[in-house]
Image: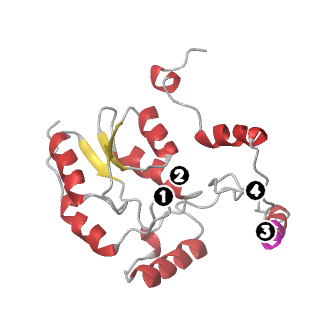
Amino acid sequence: MRLTDRTVRLYASPIAEAHAWLPHRTGTRPLLDLSQAAPSYPTAPVIARRIAQVATEPDGGRYAPPPGIPSLTHAFAEELSLDYGATLRAEQILPTGGANQAFCVTTSALTEPGDEVILPVPYYFNHDMWLRLDGVTPRYCFPDEDMQPSVAGAAELILRAPRHRARDTGQPDGRDGSTRHDPRLRGARPLERPRVDRR
């Protein structure tokens, strides 16, 4: 089987690499595993019971109706509207299997091979991997001294990127554990104005 050059050039997951270091540690203090989407602890009992219940229902193995289970999309719309002071409708919600899938779905819908997407540093490694698999070039925007998004840095990248199609703000939290300040995010919104497609 011949793999594409984009696939061959990808690097391995740093999560697996970090786990490979564990047998070599010399410390005795307990470790806190912060790996996302790869928990080392068992599923919460309430979730396990619900999964078992649905598995025995007549329609438990069917695909959910697109774009999602109505009761779920309504619940998401209500919660997001309350949390963010917005007015969202259920038909504006597309549930995914987590934030990573949401990123992949969004960028695949908005970009073509050769386009560019701005990623804030530090970024999720799989966001970089997904863009490269799609033939999209990631452009890295480094934070300021407070680990907050650099609006000036993003603006400079946009001016230098003729095929810039999207910018990942990392809202609401940063990859380093910091919280993105709302005024800083508001300051970046003028950068989101529509661009003229020159292709």
Few, some or many C-alpha atoms within 10 Å of disc 4 (few <14, some 14-19, many ≥20)? few
Determine which residue is flagged by label 2: 101
- Amino acid type at circle 1 is Asp
Q: Going by the image, does 58 lie left or right of 191?
A: right
Identify which residue, 185 or 143, lies in the foreground.
143
Residue 189, given in percent of the width and then of the height, sits at 23, 65
Scheme by which the image is coloured: secondary structure
Residue 108, given in percent of the width and then of the height, sits at 41, 44
Residue 82, given in percent of the width and then of the height, sits at 45, 84
Tag in front: 3 or 1: 1
Residue at the spot x=37%, y=60% of the render? 147
Measure the alpha-carbon separation of dots 4 and 1: 38 Å
Measure the alpha-carbon separation of dots 1 and 2: 20 Å
Tag in front: 2 or 3: 3
Query: Which residues lie in the magenta part?
Result: 45-49
Measure the alpha-carbon separation of dots 3 and 1: 26 Å
Q: Is mark 4 on a helix, strand or loop?
A: loop
Determine which residue is flagged by label 4: 61
Tag in front: 3 or 4: 3
Q: Do the residues labelled 3 and 1 touch (CB within 8 Å)?
A: no
Q: Going by the image, does 12 lie left or right of 56?
A: left
- Amino acid type at circle 4 is Gly
